[in-house]
Image: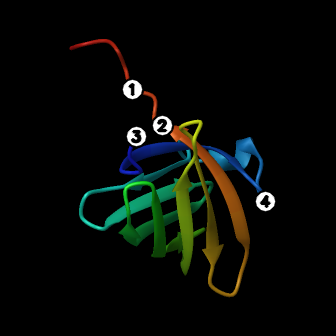
Amino acid sequence: MSLKGKWRIVEMELWDASYLDMVEPAYILFDDKAGGEFAFGCVTGHIHNRAAEKSADFTWQGNDEMDEASGDGWAELQEDGSLKGEIRFHNGDDSAFIARPWPTSSTAC
């Protein structure tokens, strides 16, 4: 299994599930271009990462309730197939997270 792809954030240390999915289902995405994005609650961010196959250290820029925000973080693939990491806000909160592979539909169109 690879770190690349979309992951459903299912738990964060500082915020409950109702906040995580306030605007849309919470997620973090790592793409093939050393980038990606995430969204949870009223926070969105564009990621610049240094990804290996099973881990990544990243910086991010985005918004928190429409105010500019930035920070850094990390993510690491776990033996059980989950993703564990942390998202840190510059001069602000740090929160650990757990994510699972994004659910895909088995229904063909």
* 3D distance between C-alphas at marks 3 and 4: 28 Å
Residue 70 marker: none
Q: Earlier in the sequence, mark 1 or mark 4?
A: 4
- Neighbourhood count class around disc 4 (C-alpha, 10 Å): few under 14, some 14–19, many 20 upward: few
Task: Report if the CB atoms under discs 1 and 4 are less than 8 Å apart.
Answer: no
- Secondary structure under tag 4 reads loop
Q: Nearer the viewer, residue 54 or 36?
A: 54
| Residue 100 appears in the figure | yes
Q: Earlier in the sequence, mark 3 or mark 4?
A: 3
Residue at 55% across / 77% down in the picture? Answer: 72
Q: Mark 3: which amino acid?
A: Met
- Neighbourhood count class around disc 2 (C-alpha, 10 Å): few under 14, some 14–19, many 20 upward: some
Q: Give how far across and how far down residue 63 sits, in percent.
A: 52, 72
Q: Which residue is mark 1?
A: 104
Q: Earlier in the sequence, mark 2 or mark 3?
A: 3
Task: Report if the CB atoms under discs 2 and 3 are less than 8 Å apart.
Answer: yes
* 3D distance between C-alphas at marks 3 and 1: 15 Å
Q: Mark 2: which amino acid?
A: Pro
Q: Nearer the viewer, residue 66 or 10?
A: 10
Residue 101 marker: 2
- Secondary structure under tag 3 reads loop
Q: Give how far across and how far down residue 47 sits, in percent.
A: 41, 69
Q: Earlier in the sequence, mark 4 or mark 2?
A: 4
Q: Residue furthest bottom?
A: 91
Q: Which residue is mark 4?
A: 14
Pair 3/4: label in front? 3
Q: Which residue is mark 3?
A: 1
| Residue 22 appears in the figure | no
Pair 2/3: label in front? 3
Pair 4/2: label in front? 2
- Secondary structure under tag 2 reads strand
